[in-house]
């Protein structure tokens, strides 16, 4: 039996995932978390074989939670789930220690396959992510500008590209507007961009928004 912890702040999504997995032979949802802190605390119990972790948690960014869990439970496979397309967070998640990345639009059978695979200690690479990796190979693994950003800087860039105001970004990231301004300045400097408009143009050209 593969015991799964679902970490997602939307009750309906947790309910749907639980129903799907509990109806599947050898899979059981034995824990649910609706915040990043709760997910980390539950992961420490050692009662789970796989964690399904949403990128967009209300208190902590999913990749921050991923890193926190992997620091204390390095053997626990974590499968990232997100509404964001693979271009946004797949490679970043894998680099941070995720066993796989799935878009929430993926077919149920794909999710079941991914859970079974990571439970065996393997990585799950979707066809979309495989395509990205192949492109990286053909380009000689040239790191794109946005891949040099920290997770917070990258999140700020994506929210800017979505047209969010400073106050909205602060609410979403649970940080002060002043801190967001610092991240915005840093990302512009790292990416050698001069204005917000240039950053937004870059994000659109590189498919960082849906």
Image (cartoon, rainbow, N blue to C red):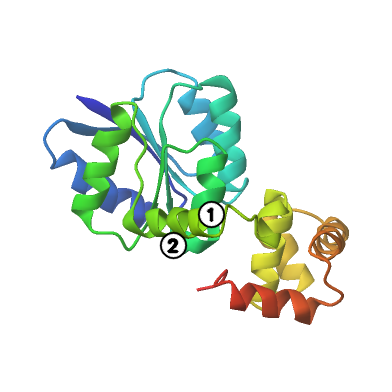
Mark 1 residue crowding within 10 angstroms, few (<14) / some (14–19) / many (20+): many
Q: Which residue is mark 1?
A: 56
Residue 59 percent location from the top left of the image: 62, 47
Residue 66 against residue 54 in the figure, above or below: above
Q: Which of the pair 178/140 is nearer the observer?
A: 140
Kindly state the secondary structure of the residue where label 1 is placed: loop
Quadrant of the drawing holding the N terminus: top left
Q: Residue at x 84, y 77 (%)?
A: 195
Residue 60 percent location from the top left of the image: 62, 45
Q: Which of the pair 97/145 is nearer the observer?
A: 145
Q: Residue at x 78, y 70 (%)?
A: 166
Mark 2 residue crowding within 10 angstroms, few (<14) / some (14–19) / many (20+): some
Q: Residue at x 28, y 38 (%)?
A: 115
Residue 50 against residue 150 in the figure, above or below: above
Q: Which of the pair 73/11 is nearer the observer?
A: 73
Residue 18 against residue 182 in the figure, above or below: above
Marks 1 and 2 close (CB-CB < 8 Å):
yes
| Apparent side of residue 165 relative to residue 159 in the rendered image (left or right) | right
Q: Which residue is mark 2?
A: 83
Among the two numbered marks 1 and 2 on one chain, the one whose residue lies closer to the N terminus: 1
Q: Residue at x 30, y 29 (%)?
A: 119
Q: Distance between the Cα atoms at labels 1 and 2?
A: 9 Å
Residue 73 percent location from the top left of the image: 51, 21
Kindly state the secondary structure of the residue where label 2 is placed: loop
Q: Which of the pair 103/122 is nearer the observer?
A: 122
Total marks in image: 2
Q: Is residue 35 visible?
A: no
Q: Is residue 19 visible?
A: yes
Residue 123 percent location from the top left of the image: 37, 37
| Apparent side of residue 16 relative to residue 73 in the rendered image (left or right) | left
């Amino acid at each position: 039996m593969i015991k799964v912890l679902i970490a997602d702040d939307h009750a309906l999504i947790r309910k749907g995932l639980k129903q799907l997995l509990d109806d599947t032979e050898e899979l059981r949802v034995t824990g649910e978390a609706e915040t990043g802190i709760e997910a980390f605390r539950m992961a420490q119990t050692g009662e789970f074989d796989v964690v399904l972790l949403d990128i967009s948690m209300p208190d902590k960014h999913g990749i921050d939670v991923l890193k926190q869990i992997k620091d204390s439970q390095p053997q626990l496979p974590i499968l990232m789930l997100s509404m964001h397309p693979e271009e946004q967070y797949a490679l970043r998640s894998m680099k941070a220690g995720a066993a796989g990345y799935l878009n929430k639009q993926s077919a149920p059978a794909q999710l079941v396959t991914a859970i079974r695979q990571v439970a065996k200690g393997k990585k799950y690479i979707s066809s979309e992510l495989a395509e990205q990796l192949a492109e990286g190979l053909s380009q000689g693994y040239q790191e794109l500008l946005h891949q040099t950003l920290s997770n917070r800087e990258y999140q700020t860039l994506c929210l800017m590209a979505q047209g969010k105001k400073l106050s909205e970004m602060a609410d979403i990231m649970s940080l002060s507007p002043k801190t967001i301004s610092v991240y915005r300045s840093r990302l512009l400097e790292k990416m050698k961009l001069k204005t917000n408009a240039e950053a937004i143009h870059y994000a659109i050209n590189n498919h960082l928004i849906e």
